[in-house]
Image (cartoon, rainbow, N blue to C red):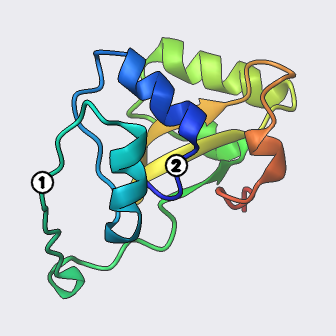
Amino acid sequence: MGEPKPSALVLVQAVSAVPELLAFADNIERVRTLLPGFSAELAFVFSAPELFPPPPPDQCREMSLSEIAAQDHLSDDRLAQLSDVAEGGVPVAAAFDGMRPVAFAYVASESESLMNQRKWCPKAK
């Protein structure tokens, strides 16, 4: 956790479904004072990013209606759903495994504005 708000930590203490928290070394004492019922233990995080392959260039992006129509691996129901959404002018985003889209997302309500910001998913080609 980053800089925890006291009110959030009080809520965590009240909810028994949260048995553990990870705090950075620079705020362990602050968390300790805000959660007196929790015990603290030292933890180490090991990472070796050079061992992981580079992420694919298009992990997630918006798909065009023609791209959606060309997906022969989708069920008829899923293809119809995504096509109807895209035909209605709603952007459809997909996460890719290689060249194949494997997960889809679109705004289902006017109150959902994440896709409107388009910071996380490039536009369709």
Residue 65's x, y, as percent? 72, 39
Residue 107's x, y, as percent? 73, 28
- Local SS, label 1: loop
Q: Does residue 8 appear left or right of residue 85 in this picture?
A: left
Q: Tell me if residue 16 comes above or below residue 69 in the rendering.
A: above
* Amino acid type for the residue under numbered disc 1: Glu
* Amino acid type for the residue under numbered disc 2: Pro
Picture disc at residue 4: 2
Picture disc at residue 41: 1
Residue 33's x, y, as percent? 39, 46
Label 1 neighbour load within 10 Å: few <14, some 14-19, many 20+: few
- Local SS, label 2: loop
Q: Tell me if residue 77 comes above or below residue 69 in the rendering.
A: above
Q: Is residue 52 visible?
A: yes
Label 2 to label 1, Cα distance in Å?
Answer: 18 Å
Q: Does residue 39 appear left or right of residue 21 in this picture?
A: left
User: Residue at 37% of width from left, 72% of height from top?
Assistant: 55
